[in-house]
Image (spheres, helix red, strand yellow):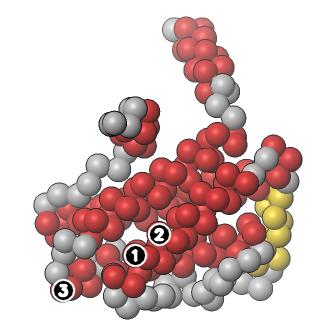
Amino acid sequence: MAARLGGLARRAGSVRSAVTLLAHYRMFGRYNAWANTRLYDAAAQLDSDQYRVDRGAFFKSLHGTLNHLLATDRIWMQRFTGTGSAPDRLDAILFEALDELRPAREAEDRRIVDYVDSLDDARIAGSIRYRRVSTPEIFEQALAPALAHWFNHQTHHRGQVHALLTGLVGRAPELDLLYYQRLSAKPAAG
């Protein structure tokens, strides 16, 4: 049995290795933008009280969590690129209204896609130096695992938004990566 499982793991590993890190992160950049669009579409259907109600999430409400996602994306993009503005707090409320937050989110998503599209193998193999928002120490981090952390962080908090939407209105949009991959693999309707 152990030999059989080991053989399956080796075969699965060889299939996974067919996808380069560049392709992987480029896919995640596009998935990120797609998932954010779906959540913002759903959030736009809520009334202001639903959007702002404290539902016990780490950043309390949809409003707080969506602002956190934009804040941390700006923080990480500044770390990765050395450009752009970044808040000095993880709980920063960058925009008070969803109709102001959404265009900023869309612009940041375009910036993220452009950034990951600009990467090459040498840059992926490199590192970044940065200071955490909460501490004065400087950290050096390999870029590839930093990107993995960043995209995982986005998924984590989008999952919270998904749960908040489900609790508020009984439904939330499909966000599974495999669903996105199936949709993006379909030829465009002409």
Q: Is residue 16 left or right of residue 168?
A: right
Locate residue 43, reporting x and y percent.
Answer: 26, 71
Amino acid type, residue under disc 2 in the picture: Glu
Residue 87, placed above or below residue 73: below
Q: Are marks 1 and 2 in contact (CB under 8 Å)?
A: yes
* Residue in the image at 61% along x and 21% along y: 15
Q: Is residue 37 left or right of residue 25?
A: left
Locate residue 147, reporting x and y percent.
Answer: 66, 56
Amino acid type, residue under disc 3 in the picture: Asp
* Residue in the image at 40% along x and 32% along y: 187
* Location of residue 167 by image quarter: bottom left
Residue 21, placed above or below residue 161: above
Q: Give the residue at mark 3.
A: 49
Question: Which numbered tag is attached to residue 102?
Answer: 1
* Location of residue 180 by image quarter: top left
Q: CA distance from mark 3 to mark 1?
A: 18 Å
Quarter in which the C terminus is drawn: top left
Locate residue 160, reporting x and y percent.
Answer: 35, 65
Q: Residue furthest left?
A: 170
Q: Give the residue at mark 2.
A: 106
* Residue in the image at 68% along x and 80% along y: 84
Q: Is residue 168 left or right of residue 17?
A: left
Q: What secondary structure is found at the residue carrying circle 1?
A: helix
Can residue 81 be seen from the camera position used here? yes
Q: Nearer the viewer, residue 16 or 114?
A: 114
Packing grade of label 3 (10 A; few <14, some 14-19, many >=20) is: few
